Image (spheres, rainbow, N blue to C red):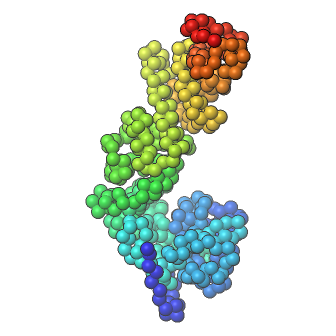
Amino acid sequence: MTEVCTQDKERLKHQKTSPPIHDVRKDLLNHLPEKQNNAVCKFCHIIRDAGFSCYIIGGAVRDLLRGKKAEDVDFTTDARPEEVQKIFHSVIPTGIQHGTLMVRLGGFSFEITTFRSEKEYSDSRRPDQVWFSTSLEEDLKRRDFTINSIAYDPLTGELFDPHGGMQDIQKQILQTVGKAEERFYEDGLRPIRACRFAAYLGFDLETKTRSAFNLPSVQQRCSQIAPERLHAELEKGLSSRSASRMIQLMEESGLIFLFYKSNRFTTSKEDLNYIDQLYPASPWFRMAYWRFATGSSSREELEQWAQDIRCSSRQKRDIHFWNQYFHFQKNMYLKMLEEKKDSSWKQQKEFMRQPKVLFQIRYFLSSIKATYRNKTKDFLSQTRYHTKASIPYQELLQIYQNSPLIPTDLKINGNELQKEGISKGYEIGQIIQELLDRTLHDPKLNQKETLLKIAKEWKRKNRIEK
């Protein structure tokens, strides 16, 4: 449990110093929507009017400096948590033991944390001791990366950047505040966050920061983090345009294999590039391709992988079936090669119109619809990003919409078969499956009279008693 070390409030007031100003940018908030801009300024005015300082901090400043809008705007202040609670009406004590509160204002949620210093991270995540401070510079020293250690005063436009974060943003470099080994040892998640930031921002890692990944002390510390935290970082990283950067860094450094204990693998440069081309597909669709590209095909192996990184049941299911989708497309491609078809659209269409190929497509779609039911279109919608597909998304969608794929798509059901005296009990299931198999080969057979005729013929052939 974190220990908060208190100090004499009057003594701290006399310790307040004005940090050096590194730049003035009064236009940064223009990147925010007007309503959010107004709420941010009002928030700061309220705290200033109460006699305290207030700065935007972290990722919001970084993204605003890059000309991007900031989804979440976080603040830092010299006001103690109990003082912030007195200033605002709607306050949620999300992390009050660490000096962090959530304030609701103007339809927005703002996280605000008291200036602090920290000591020791025995659990690889939280500091053992926290000192509340009145020094912005002390607070910035504890940050993970230079690009996240910039403070911005939205009322004056002043930027405070004692660690050169703005320069690193310009150079598109990611490096730690201070020694990388120390920062990574404090919180074992930071190396993985570095990989994720490289993907999200498209930045390169500074040499010493990258080298620290391989230090035994850092790897040991990283291995202690909860798999759920890895899962969250992977989801964010694989949602980024340059997801391949995260994958490559984690494979080369071995960070991913601290959690996945099976065989190591390396993704080829071609496949890494293609993972980026799959943007903005679901992160789990891209993960399915990642594991397909590295040779993972069995359901057991994929489930173990998904379990190791704490995927939900739905995510496990999606990864498995999207992996199957990529294998299906590969098999279709190999069959096209066997028939000496080239990649022209004319020859591709000729290939897809063959009865045996159409059956294989319907058979694959049948397994998908049997699992996803009325969500099958949502599942298939992700495949539109797979531009190398032998069977394109629109073709799959058309066949899905015009073919009987599961028993409920048939124009006859078990009750109707019983009324016709065809069968009863478990035998109905046998007949329904026969009808489905026949219509997967030829959807035109899906007419009630035709299906009834097939059922009667099947009964005579198999000598099923009434």
Q: Is 211 above or below relative to 342?
A: below
Residue at image position (48%, 37%) is 320
Q: Residue at x 51, y 76 (%)?
A: 97
Place of residue 53 in the rendered image (x, y in percent of width and height, measured from the top left): 58, 81
* Location of the N terminus (image quadrant): bottom left
Q: In the rendered image, is residue 261 in sight?
A: yes
* Tally of numbered tags: 0
Depicted 331 relative to depicted 163: above or below: above
At x 66%, y 13%, the residue is: 422
- Asked if residue 51 is positioned above or below residue 230 in the image, the reply reads below
- 234 left or right, relative to 362: left
User: On the picture, is 88 further left or further right than 119?
Assistant: right
Residue 332 as seen in the image, left or right of residue 178: right
**223 and 56: which one is in front?**
223
Q: Residue furthest front?
A: 466
| Image quarter of the C terminus | top right
Which picture quadrant has residue 38?
Answer: bottom right
Residue located 61% across and 13% down the image: 442
Relative height, residue 265 to residue 207 (above, below): above
Tell whether 27 sits left or right of 228: right
Q: Position of residue 210 (x, y in %)?
A: 34, 57
Residue 383 is situated, as x and y percent measured from the top left of the image, at: 56, 34
Q: Image quarter for residue 409?
A: top right
- Residue 118: tell me if it is visible: no
Name which quarter of the figure residue 366 lies in. top right
Q: Give the camera-side residue of 24 and 437.
A: 437
